[in-house]
Image (cartoon, rainbow, N blue to C red):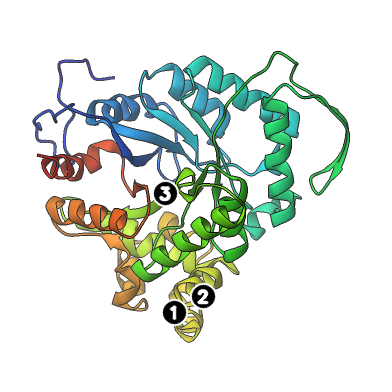
Amino acid sequence: MATSNESPRAPDGQQTLPVSKERTLHELGFYALAGGVESARPIFDELEQAEELGFGTAFISERANKEAMSLSGAALASTTKIRVATGVTNPNTRHPQILASAAATLCDISGGRFVLGIGRGIEIGMKALGLSVQTTAQLEDFAEVMRKLWSGEMILGHEGPIGRFPVLRLGSNVRARVPLMLAAFGPNSLALAGRCFDEVLLHTYFTDETTARVVGTARQAAEVAGRDPADVKVWSCFATIGDHVPEELRLKKTVGRLATYLQAPGYGELLVNTNRWDLAVLEKFRADTVVAGMRGAIDEIATADQIEHIAGLIPEAWFEGSATGSPEACAAAVRGQLDLGVDAVILHGGNPDILRPVVEAYRAGDA
């Protein structure tokens, strides 16, 4: 881990100047250990740099070798200011009392810096675990159970969409205010987020029109439910890959990432339909021999030549929902997301080292 008097290095290996620490950028987040990992240990260096840069929230995604709750504990123990959010875990992978206890514990030891983010799950991944994708009713039932447990309530004989449980309790002395975040895509989950979640996480590669529309859906649902729409914090998950990133890596994080979303059955259709894109383009993309021959996620296994070929299959307009170009252009695009009505933006696609020039340019806009 770098010592406090060292400046982290930029992707080209050059020393960079330290950024201003005048304010914490509560409206900016990033993904720690983005993508697949061989080891989780780099999370400590990433978080040190993230706090130095002033990021407000670190998100931790979950994969087979990245268990989100244990990583959240490590992240909170090694930091002092940044919030840590699971982004996201699936609530049916753990007993509800166990997950409620873990979240309450993390909230307690961190002084309230933990956010429990959940999502439905992807069908193919859930089936591989012998589980099912969560329904809207199950997600709502889960949220209600969590809040009861965090308020110290004992739940006897629960029978609801998440299942039957004779007794659920954390203890009458528990008073945990854990923010609940929902990864929302379609109208049902967006409306649910507005009704009973504290934060909502949008999907990557939403068009500007889609972003403004789905923000409106969540806010309207909050108002109908008698809540203040401003109480629902909306996160844009915004692909941010500037020209300072080496070209091969840049293509992997743009073309490769979007192509991976599109190749997934059901998932690709949802993204295309939400953005009101042409499904015929998706069908042609999947029918391509290179895409059809992939036996894994494109952004993990495709060669540089294959990704270059795949780039020609995806319309240029489908990449417009991202921040590209110079660091200054990326920073301006991030501010553009805030203008669409979101409250905060995840700079998706890089670790703090890669994102440093964009954050510096964004801070310069505060001056």
Label 2 belongs to which residue? 273
Horizontal side of 61 relative to 34 (left or right) equals right
In the image, residue 108 lies at what x, y percent? 55, 17
> Which dot marks residue 58?
none
> Which dot marks residue 277?
1
Residue in the picture at 67% in, 33% down: 147
- Residue 191 in view here: yes
Q: Secondary structure at mark 2?
A: helix
Residue in the picture at 57% in, 26% down: 177
**Which badge, 1 or 3, is on the more N-terminal residue?**
3
Q: Residues at badges 2 and 1 in contact (C-beta under 8 Å)? A: yes
Q: How dense is the environment of label 1, judged by Cα within 10 Å: few (below 14), some, or many (20 and up)?
A: some
Q: Secondary structure at mark 1?
A: loop
Q: Nearer the viewer, residue 87 or 226?
A: 226
The amino acid pointed to by label 1 is Trp
Q: Nearer the viewer, residue 56 or 289?
A: 56
Label 3 belongs to which residue? 235
- Above or below: residue 40 compared with residue 195: above
The amino acid pointed to by label 2 is Asn
In the image, residue 36 lies at what x, y percent? 45, 44
